[in-house]
Structure formats: structure tokens, C-alpha cells
Image: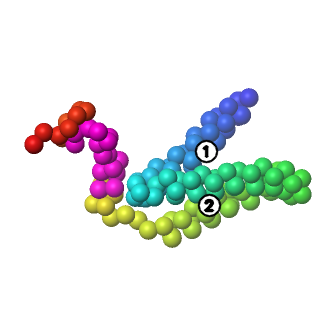
Amino acid sequence: MQTALPAAVVTGTFGSMSLVIPQTAMQRAVPNAVLGRIGAVFLTGEAAATLAGAVAGPILAQAAGLTGVAAAAGLVTLGAAALARLTVPRLPPAAAAISGPSARTRPSPGTRADTGRAGPARR
């Protein structure tokens, strides 16, 4: 128990980060017009990877042993991180500031852009 609880906390923390960070980066980089479509493809890929891991994990654990599978999973994760670092283009600082959440905020339909209150805009 002394080792299991800290290991679970660390695993949960990094597991959550591995889901939240790519989702946030995608929402900042993708234009609003296609964000729903890209998000659906992104979530479908996550679901397919989860299913593949659930099916292949036990088979690989029996064939190679739990330690070998854990080591291989760690190496694949590090390799994917290195590949992403090399291939994903970086936004320049000015573009990152423009594409942040505040740049995407638009008034709701039926509200005045200057106040956010309902009603027609005065001229």
C-alpha cells in the first residue's frame, strides 16, 4: 500500500495530462468552423486506441510478461513523444496569443456585440 498509492497518483496525474493537453492544443490550433469535425476524429482515434490496448494488452502480457509489456509501452510512449516534438510545428508566440481562448470568444446569437446583452444593437 505504501508504494501503490503514490504510484496510482502519479499514473493518474500523467494519464489525465495526456488527455487534457492534446485536447487543449487542438482546440487552440483548429479554426472554429471545423473544430467539431476534427474533435470527432480525435476522440474516435482515442477510443480506437483504448479498444486496441484493451484487446492486445492481456495477450501481450501473457506472451511477453507484464514487465516486458510495461517496458515496451514506456518506450513506445517516449518514441511517440520524440516524434511529435520533431514533427509538430510550433506556433510563434504572437500566433499563440491570437489563437488563445479569448480570441475565439464571440457574442452569442441575438446579443449585442458591444455589451453581450440581448436585444438589437443601437445605431
In this rendering, position of residue 120 left or right of residue 55:
left
In the rendered image, is residue 53 in sight? Answer: yes
Q: Quick one: SS at disc 1? A: helix
Total labels: the figure holds 2
Q: State the predominant SS element of the stretch in magenta.
A: loop
**Gap in angstroms between the C-alphas marked 1 and 2:** 14 Å
Residue 71: name its quadrant. bottom right
In the rendered image, is residue 65 in sight? Answer: no
Numbered tag placed on residue 15 in the rendering: 1
**Residue pushed farthest top?**
1
* x, y percent for residue 59: 87, 54
In this rendering, position of residue 110 left or right of residue 52:
left
Is 56 situated above or below 11? Answer: below
Query: Closer to the camera, 107 or 28?
Result: 107
Tell me the amino acid under the disc marked 1: Gly
Query: Closer to the camera, 108 or 76?
Result: 108
Residue at the spot 17% in from the left edge and 40% down from the top edge: 121
Provide the residue span drawn in magenta.
98-113
Q: In which quarter of the image is the N terminus?
A: top right
Residue bearing mark 2: 78
In this rendering, position of residue 112 left or right of residue 100:
left
* x, y percent for residue 53: 75, 53
Residue at the spot 41% in from the left edge and 57% down from the top edge: 33
**Residue pushed farthest right?**
63
